[in-house]
Amino acid sequence: MLPIHLVREYRAAKKLQPHRQRSVFDNVHHVSTDGDIDGWTYLSDLEIPSPNWIDANNYRAIEPERFNEVLSSLSVAFEECYFIDYGSGKGRALLLASEYPFKEIVGLEFSPDLHRIAETNVLHYRSATQKCKNIRCLNLDFVNFELPSGPLVLFFFDPCRLRVLERVVARIDNAAQIRSSPIYVAYVAPRTETEKVFESAKFLEKIAQNLDSRFVIYRNHR
């Protein structure tokens, strides 16, 4: 295994390669949500103040088709719901969510660098079909986020490993105990160990699953 300083030098060289093709989504909407190297942005290349970065997964932008499959699996009144993206990175999921009439869209990102890029993307996003412009990007560690009151759609694109996810699910459980409004959890690209966290959460029930696009939808018990 290469030393970390050599890995970083390699990644820096890859970033400087000319003619790196942007995704169709970024070109069409005048944003920059792609990963830096072969579709990925590596957190070890960034300065992140939270100690939880060691349990976080690297950033990769979700495919629009896959995202829309996830949202189409939800039978909800979007205009009543908050959309919360855990580990929003450069903000592609936030922009895709803005094509739906959510009450508010919130991105939670602990990297200051990725957070600033997401804010810029929200400002520059151009879409004639955008239905929600109430978008907030928060630069914080999502284990500390207090859920708002009201119906929620919580979006996870494999943002972290087991230790952090268990803490987040515990906070969601606490919130579910003191409210009657629905909480939907959309988990994309679940790993076996992280999926077990939601499967064992007694306050949740699985309501949808797509093995081809690899996502699972949960809802708190009525």
Image (spheres, rainbow, N blue to C red):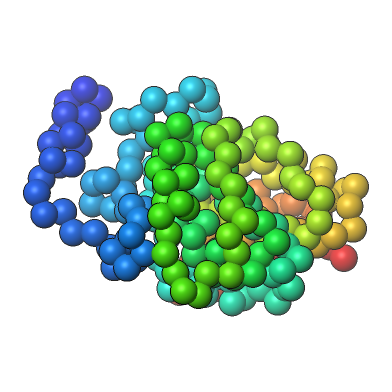
In the rendered image, the quadrant that contains the N terminus is top left
Q: x and y percent of residue 100 in the render?
A: 59, 70
Could you tell me which residue is drawn at 9 percent across and 49 percent down?
18
The residue lying toward the viewer, choosing from 94 and 4, is: 94
Could you tell me which residue is drawn at 33 percent across and 38 percent down?
42
Tell me: 200 left or right of 87: right
The residue lying toward the viewer, choosing from 158 and 41, is: 41
Q: x and y percent of residue 120 in the render?
A: 42, 46
Could you tell me which residue is drawn at 55 percent across and 44 percent down?
137
126 in relation to 37, above or below = below
Tell me: 130 left or right of 13: right
Q: Is residue 219 visible to the viewer in this orientation of the structure?
A: no
Could you tell me which residue is drawn at 33 percent across and 52 percent down?
32
Q: Is residue 104 visible to the viewer in this orientation of the structure?
A: yes
Q: x and y percent of residue 61 in the render?
A: 39, 55
In the rendered image, the quadrant that contains the C terminus is bottom right
